[in-house]
Amino acid sequence: MFVQDTLLNRLKRGCETMAYPKGAAPALPDRHGGALRVDAARCDAKCGACVTVCPTEAIARPAGKPVALDLGRCIFCAECVTVCPTKAITRTGDHRMAVRRREDLVLGDASKEQVRLAQALDEKLRRLFGRSLRLRQVSAAGCNACEADTNVLGTIGWDLGRFGIQFVASPRHADGLLITGPVSKNMELALKKTYAAVPDPKIVIAVGACAIAGGPFIGHPQHHNGTSALLPVDLYIPGCPPHPLTILDGLLRLLGRLDEPTGIR
Amino acid sequence: MKRDTPFTLLTNGSALSWSDVPEWPLTEFLGNVGAELDRGERLSGLFGVPEGDALRIVAVLAFDAGNTLAVGRSQPFSGSFPALTATHAQAHLFEREIWEQHGVVPENHPWLKPVRKDHGAGPAVGDFFRVDGSEIHEVAVGPVHAGIIEPGHFRFQCAGEEVLHLEIALGFQHRGIEEAVTGGPHRATVYQMETVAGDTTIAHTTAYANALEALAGTEAPLRAQWLRAIALELERLANHTGDLGALAGDVAFLPTASACGKIRGDFLNLTALLCGNRFGRGLVRPGGCPLDCDAERLSQLRKRLETALAEVQQAAAWLWDAASVRTRFEHTGHLHAKQAAEIGLVGPAARACGLVRDVRFDHPTGWHRFAQVPVSVWPDGDVFARARVRWLEIQRSGDFLREQLDAVPEGETMAPLPALAPNSLAVALVEGWRGEVCHVALTGVDGTLRRYKITDPSFHNWTGLALALRNQAISDFPLCNKSFNLSYCGFDL
Amino acid sequence: MMESSAILLTFTLWVYVAGMAGALLFQRAERLANAVGFGLAALGGACGVVFSVSSLAAGQGMTITPVTLWSGPIPGVRFVVEADALSCFFVLVVSLVGLAISVFSLGYVRTYYGRKNVGVMACVFNALLLVTTLVFIAGNLWMFLIAWELMALLAYGMVSFEHEDRETRQAGVLFFIMSHLDAACVLLGFLVLAQAAGGFSFASFRGIGASLSPQQRDVAFVLFVFGFGIKAGIVPLHIWLPVAHPVAPSNISALMSGVLIKTGIYGLVRVCFEFLGPPPMWWGASLLAVGTVSAVLGVLYALMEHDLKRLLAYHSIENIGIILMGLGASLMFLHTGHAVLASLALIAGLYHTINHATFKALLFLGAGAVLHATHTRNMEEMGGLAKRMRWTALFFLVGAVAISALPPLNGFVSEWLTYQSLLHGFGTTTSLVRLMFPLGGAMLALTGALAAACFVKAFGITFLAQPRSDHARDAHEASLPMLIGQGVLTAACVFLGLFPTVFLKLLDPITLQLTGHQLSQQLTMANGLVLSGVAAQGGTVSTLGIMLMFGCLLPVPLALWAVFARKARTRIAPTWDCGQRALTPHMEYTATGFSKPLRMIFKALFRPRREVQREYDFSPYFATTLRFESHMEEVFLTRIYRPVNYGLLRLSRRLRALQAGSLQAYLIYIFVTLVALLLFAL
């Protein structure tokens, strides 16, 4: 009879929620690769292999300037890693990638070999949202992978609720929006209305390469190439899709709930 | 089974020269298609190929009983064409799509409305069907839905709590994939194929790879085909587990809902074990699979698979045991086999109505030519049947995976892809977890893709949901919607 | 009667007469006729209220003396007036409601200017108030029956006021027929009494039941229940009520529902408690049963209505049922000898009478204001009126809360008293009849819940959300007299709810006269703040206390608002609509849709039929039109009235054979009759 069975099962299994952030983060799949790192010093001035191979034109090598890899456009296909002869672009295996400012995602300059991770919200918003953040998720033409990996944060392994973060049904109940997808023209009105329906103060989180810069569909006329065209964004989480750990890390960083300092490991 | 048909036959995952595709004048062409549909065959694709200012319509039919596909095309025409939908309901969305993409009008189409286009302020504009009567009210839901889910608009006509008619308006996620592929394959094309429907990456990318390999006149190495089949079943396992959990959640049966939520993540991590990405991005490419898996990795996969399968077995057992769950599932969202056949339903939704149709069985390609997965069928056509079919498929996929992981073929996994043959047509069908994924590729004179048609299984099945809701209580809508679990973005492209 | 109150009563009656005359006199000058006619009616109502309250308050000092109004040339025909406590109570009812309606009418009849004769309406209105008052104060059979008949005729006239409409004419005819049926039954009943009393005065009827044989008493009882029951609108004699009340002008509907059906209650109380003597158990039990059935069926049918006035009419049936439950319980207690409980039940019934009069009239006036503004009675075409008719919405809301018996308003008080009497009933007797008490209590609870559901629907669909039609969109607030009229009744509801202990004192003389007990002392505790049930286990409730509690709690949110709202910015934004283009009124719940689940639950009673028509050109999957209709079977009409009608017609067809048309046959009839009479005389 399922009643006894489920109770016994629960008792046997105990608590299945991961210890992170109080413990170590769960390991990323070994082939995942995590964030990319650009060591511009190793670049050969005449080489442009990574530029031609990148499907979303995320890498630029303007004349006289070092290589610039825009992690916001990156879909983490790792073609550039494979093709680079000097190993200037490498995979770090680090899950932490969330940033507050769009320019922080552009790697390549001397001090920007790796991502400058997100600072927490300012004092006022942290007091409001730090212990209770209600988000309204809007899928503005997302392919359902970012949505699925956001959804999984609500399951018992990740348990987003223990941080006071919850996804709500109505924007009226929300403190901010979590947007996935490149923001198609067909969703423009709905997104604007949803944003308008959220009471102030509000935050906007863009999850996934599509929401930041259009993802694999970058340049198509059917959409706006990401959220920034329409709304001010407070947090960018790159990935295609970002691993749930990356999303969680980004959210916690935004709320100032992580103990470790931001920056390079 | 050999029989007479004017169409040219071809197998799944093969190509033929464009000039070998038989052509007829428009009315004769439509008549031939209609005749085949009358014989009980299925329409896998009906789309337009522009020829200068005129248009040709190409039809891809699936002769399930004969285990073969059939293609044919019309001569170029312009202006309008007599609608096939008037006599065969399964063509309705295809013809609306032709109208929208190419501007030719299907005459006497009983439901000529846009499919994906925006009208200045998003789709779901224009007159929705209204039921007459003083006690009727409308319920309009979407595009932004209450949970973390893709956008779509549902317009119910209700008499009190009973739904008399449901109209579904999609197109909110139109990203213009088919248009972008034209002239390709471009750098970004394979990545766009992976994200046509982000949770069906393996199926769509495999279909794309098969189509391109057929055009190049080659096949992926056997080990790659084997790996693709493994990944396809893992994708099926993950999504069916998630669906069972979501269905349990909708009837407030939390033990299974919370257990399956976690187990789905475990299955996704199995795919990530193979390629690093939980959805299988980067696993399949035209020419094979770029990442090989050594014996160590495969044995780890096998071990973790067993654990996950045992857990989902237990979670589902609780679900079937609970009388409250069965009360909600049974006789809800009912579809008859006849309706399912007439509207051309595919996938678990069709198999749950008793129709035996599965691409792995009817049109085997790749590894499925060597190893069979039994078709999971349940006759009732209600939510319970659809849940039950998913459960059977979980078990059968599990068995298939165990069997295959015990007999690993040797060899390479990746071979360079030769150039694509010019002026050729290739068709590739894959049984994704929602149903039949159909990719049709047509190359031009220079070997680039002149026209690429993607048909996600949701394209066939959204009509099924609209029918299943008739005369149901509106409070059962989330349950019915979950039991179909269709892709909004796969439809919208 | 004391001198001053007699003068007051006479003055009241003459004011009505003056109103009649004045209205007719000035009928060509509409505004003057309106002002004079309804103004004088209001004055008369006010005087009537003063008269009745002062008489009841005087209480024990009241002596009952019949006064002969007029005795003309015909021997034996005299009109006697006698205003005892019961009469004064009902005069209070008619006057209070009449006052409010008159004020309302000052504004309401403006819609008839130029179309219909307002003077005639005002005249008939005054006449109605006059004859209804006469019914209540009638002291002998002549006065009573003449006034009764006049009331029926005048009411018929008013129901058919807008006789251009076929539906109205048919309603009027049905009302006319049923009124005469009830007059006939009442007359027969009184004749049984008169035959034993030897005269026609009510004074001689008191206690006459003792001199009748049990069979005669039973026959009289049944006749009275039929007669007064038709008037009151009990099930199954109610079919005229939901037909006639909606088609009358709204101020008349308010008068009919609020007052005219109470004449039936008055008649039953007068007859059962005073004239017919000690009741056997089955009288009370049958009244309790009939009351319960009326209450439940009334509210169930009300739930299914989407015509606002018909909905209110069915609620009248429900509330009459509740009143009868109190009266029936009272009779049962009289039989078992529990006079105190009998008083309690009687008080509950009478309190509910005045409560129903006030809140039903209030609701009808509200419906009248809505009808005036939107020109439709169909709730499916209304909506969004709360923003356009704020005061009317507020008054209607108070009426809705009152009729749903929610504290702290008056409906709650009278139903609480009814529950008290029913709860105590179980212990009063050992026979199986005692099961009726808890059963009645349970059914009363069911009606309370269904009534609340019904008014959520009525208020919600009519006033809330967006307007569903252009009429509703263009609605405007009612005029000042209409608002004042509603306000008077709202104030009455609030007063009757918050100060029951004060009002109960007025009911003392009635119970003293009818059952021999005065209960207001026993029912009051804590210096009048708390209402208490009669026995130890009865419990107590204080509506005033509840109100004070609300009042004490209210500053808390207000304070929070004052502190925090200053710093917050307010932004007004449209309702969340899932990101669509726009919400349309078609997306709002319909009245029929709201009640559909209940219709399904009570399928056996309603026997709903649905009809779906689907038209398609090519394929059934793509319909071109889809039409949906549902109907309910009118159970009483088809299963009781029609068979009775057909039976009667068949019988008459048989009897037609007697009218052969031949002279010889008729001569033989005369001969046979003559012979029979002669034999009989011998």
Image: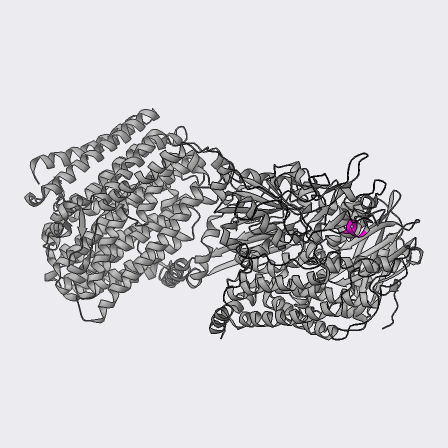
In the rendered structure, which segment of residues is drawn in magenta?
A77-82
Q: Which residue is drawn at 62% across and 55% down?
A: A148
The image shows residue B493 at horizontal and vertical percentages of 73, 50
Q: Residue at x 13, y 58 (%)?
A: C340
The x and y percentages for residue B436 are 74, 62
Q: Which of C256 and C408 is in front in this view?
A: C408
Q: Main secondary structure of the magenta part?
A: helix
Lateral position of residue B2 relative to residue B385, left or right: right
Along the horizontal axis of the image, is B404 left or right of C555? Answer: right
Indicate the quadrant where residue C213 lies: bottom left
Q: Is B319 in the magenta? A: no
Residue B175 visible:
no
Q: What colour scheme was applied to this rendering of the protein? A: one colour
Tell me residue B128's x, y (percent): 63, 46
From the top left corner, tell me how far across and down residue C521 is, in percent.
Answer: 11, 50
Please state which of residues C146 and B250 is positioned toward the viewer in this rendering. B250
Labels in figure, total: 0
Residue B224 seen anywhere in this rendered image of the structure: yes
Towards the viewer: A50 or C199: A50
Residue A184 picture quarter: top right
In the picture, the quarter occupied by the N terminus of chain B is bottom right
Q: Residue A186 falls in which quadrant of the image?
A: top right
- Of B102 and C296, nearer the camera is B102
Check the image and report above or below for B20 versus C93.
Answer: below
